[in-house]
Image (cartoon, helix red, strand yellow):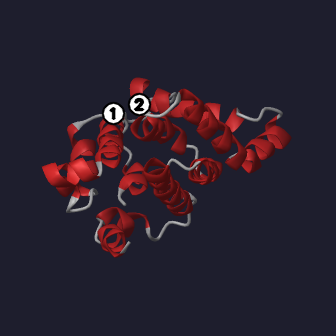
């Protein structure tokens, strides 16, 4: 755990986001705990760990909608070699974790998935058609270079052969997440995968 602490504190993304009072930090912490329990589940095959992971990922979503972009990648990376029913369990557990958010959306807007659909559609519009109001798109060499600068210095180490074999599923998740970040270059998304 000490290595994760140093890895996270040496990352420029933590310095960049530190002054902001936002749910991103809490959401990424909950996502990190979800990752911890999914790794325990992969070692011990205990449904209790899958339950904790799903609940924590759902709570992470309750604080920040961008988690919805990373959750399918998370499931593909960590559950690809498991029974399909375990993937369904994970989705159910994540929905249970997201109940506070879904309930709030139901009360405020009359639809439990209103906030999620709104966020996903706005992000897709910004990514592919430069937003509804002609904003600057998220693609471009400048955004890509800025994004790369905010990755931790030692990110390349995860792709060394011996480390990759030991942490195969985590490396797959990070690789898929980087591909998503190249497509949707928002610096704040990097905080989610820095640990």
Q: Percent x, y for residue 122?
A: 54, 32
- Residue at 63 percent across and 37 percent down: it is 89
Residue 127: which disc? 2
Q: Which residue is mark 1?
A: 183
Q: Position of residue 95 (x, y in %)?
A: 68, 41
Quadrant that contains the C terminus: bottom left
Q: Relative to 75, is 174 above or below? A: below
Q: CA distance from mark 1 to mark 2?
A: 7 Å
Left or right side of 168 for 186 = right
- Residue 9's x, y, as percent? 34, 72
Element at badge 1? Answer: helix
Q: Residue at x 51, y 60 (%)?
A: 33
As helix, strand or loop, the secondary structure at mark 2 comes to helix
Q: Is label 1 in contact with label 2 (beta carbons under 8 Å)? A: yes
The label shown at residue 19 is none
Residue found at the very far top of the displayed protein: 129
Nearer the observer, 156 or 49: 49
Q: Residue at image x 58%, y 44%? A: 65
Residue 193 screen position, x and y as percent: 38, 53
Label 2 Cα crowd, 10 Å radius (few <14 / some 14-19 / many 20+): some
Q: Earlier in the sequence, mark 1 or mark 2?
A: 2
In front of the other: 73 or 136 = 73
């Amino acid at each position: 755990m000490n290595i994760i602490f140093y890895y996270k504190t040496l990352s420029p993304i933590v310095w960049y986001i530190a002054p902001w009072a936002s749910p991103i930090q809490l959401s990424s912490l909950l996502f990190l705990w979800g990752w911890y329990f999914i790794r325990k589940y992969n070692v011990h095959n205990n449904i209790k760990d899958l339950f904790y992971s799903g609940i924590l990922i759902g709570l992470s979503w309750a604080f920040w909608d961008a988690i919805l972009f990373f959750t399918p990648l998370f499931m593909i990376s960590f559950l690809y070699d498991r029974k399909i029913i375990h993937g369904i369990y994970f989705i159910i557990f994540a929905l249970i974790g997201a109940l506070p958010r879904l309930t709030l959306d139901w009360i405020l807007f009359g639809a439990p998935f209103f906030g999620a659909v709104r966020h996903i559609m706005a992000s897709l519009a910004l990514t592919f058609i430069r937003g509804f109001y002609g904003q600057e798109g998220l693609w471009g060499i400048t955004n890509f270079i800025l994004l790369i600068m905010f990755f931790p210095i030692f990110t390349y180490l995860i792709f060394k052969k011996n480390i990759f074999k030991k942490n195969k599923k985590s490396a797959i998740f990070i690789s898929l997440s980087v591909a998503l970040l190249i497509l949707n270059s928002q610096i704040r998304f990097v905080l989610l995968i820095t640990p």
